[in-house]
């Protein structure tokens, strides 16, 4: 099997783009949708898998490049797996995660005033690797953890300041980014498609 030499990383999210770049070999030529001025398509799917496929097909069609897309999000048990596939949409048009995190705390408190022992959650990432001829592979990665009672740490992006992975006491926002990127949902999804690159 010949290894992929160039790829479009199908995301307009800077945090995700940075993490995916770090997972891929240095020598691989990487493009971003921003370089082609392509906005992310409407995510009309009902699952991470469907949305990840929608993004990969759309970006690959627009550029004729092999595309690696990522659809991810945070599922909180107390909120019946919300925000889930709506994780990005909870931050509004301006991608304001202070707002999205506030919404999470409010919703959790409304359901249970003291939710500190009812805070299990997981991050999920579904990646799709898709070739211009339509061939494609999907993989999923999950990391389980807990919602922190307050925002902690300035590293990472999105919901990182409120997620404490199982086995650790720091939030993703407090962790060294190298550590986060070696254990998270994105890393786990990537492991299953790594063979196409390395
Ligand atoms: P693209 O569709 O262009 O990739 P997006 O931000 O809309 O960008 P998603 O639809 O996949 O991406 O939304 C996932 C959201 O879940 C994202 O906006 C993050 O806030 C959050 N998320 C996913 N992975 C995360 C991580 O590792 N750390 C923190 N938040 C994460």
Image (tube, rainbow, N blue to C red):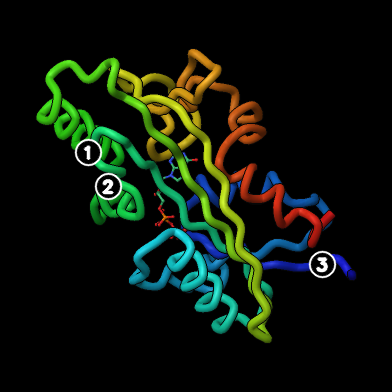
Question: Of marks 2 and 1, which one's residue comes earlier in the chain?
Answer: 2
Classed neighbour count for the residue bearing mark 1: other residues with Cα under 10 Å, few (<14), some (14–19), many (≥20): few
Question: Of marks 3 and 2, which one's residue comes earlier in the chain?
Answer: 3
Instruction: Report which residue position mark 2 lands on.
Output: 91
The residues tagged by marks 2 and 1 sit, at their Cα atoms, a distance apart of 6 Å
- The answer to whether the beta carbon of the residue marked 2 is less than 8 Å from any atom of ligand 1 is yes
Is any atom of residue 75 visible in this view?
yes
Residue 61 locus on image (x, y percent): 57, 83
Callout 1 secondary element? helix
The residues tagged by marks 3 and 2 sit, at their Cα atoms, a distance apart of 35 Å
Q: Is residue 7 above or below residue 157?
A: below
Residue 100 locus on image (x, y percent): 25, 40
**Disc assigned to residue 99:** 1
Residue drawn at point x = 62 percent, y = 32 percent? 183
Instruction: Report which residue position mark 3 lands on.
Output: 5
In this rendered view, identify the residue nearer to me: 5 or 47.
47
104 with respect to 172 (left or right): left
Residue 6 locus on image (x, y percent): 76, 68
Residue 196 locus on image (x, y percent): 79, 62
């Amino acid at each position: 099997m010949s290894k992929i030499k160039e790829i479009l990383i199908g995301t307009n999210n800077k945090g995700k783009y940075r993490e995916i770049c770090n997972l891929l070999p240095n020598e691989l030529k990487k493009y971003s949708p921003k370089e082609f001025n392509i906005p992310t398509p409407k995510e009309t799917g009902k699952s991470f898998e469907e949305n990840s496929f929608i993004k990969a097909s759309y970006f690959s069609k627009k550029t004729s490049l092999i595309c690696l897309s990522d659809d991810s999000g945070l599922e909180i048990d107390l909120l019946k797996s919300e925000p889930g596939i709506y994780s990005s949409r909870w931050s509004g048009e301006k991608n304001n995660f202070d707002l999205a995190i506030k919404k999470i705390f409010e919703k959790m408190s409304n359901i249970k005033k003291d939710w500190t022992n009812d805070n299990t959650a997981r991050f999920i990432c579904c990646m799709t690797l898709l070739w211009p001829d339509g061939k494609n592979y999907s993989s999923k990665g999950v990391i389980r953890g807990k919602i922190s009672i307050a925002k902690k740490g300035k590293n990472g992006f999105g919901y990182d300041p409120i997620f404490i992975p199982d086995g650790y006491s720091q939030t993703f926002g407090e962790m060294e980014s190298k550590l986060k990127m070696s254990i998270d949902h994105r890393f786990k999804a990537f492991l299953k498609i790594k063979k196409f690159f390395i």
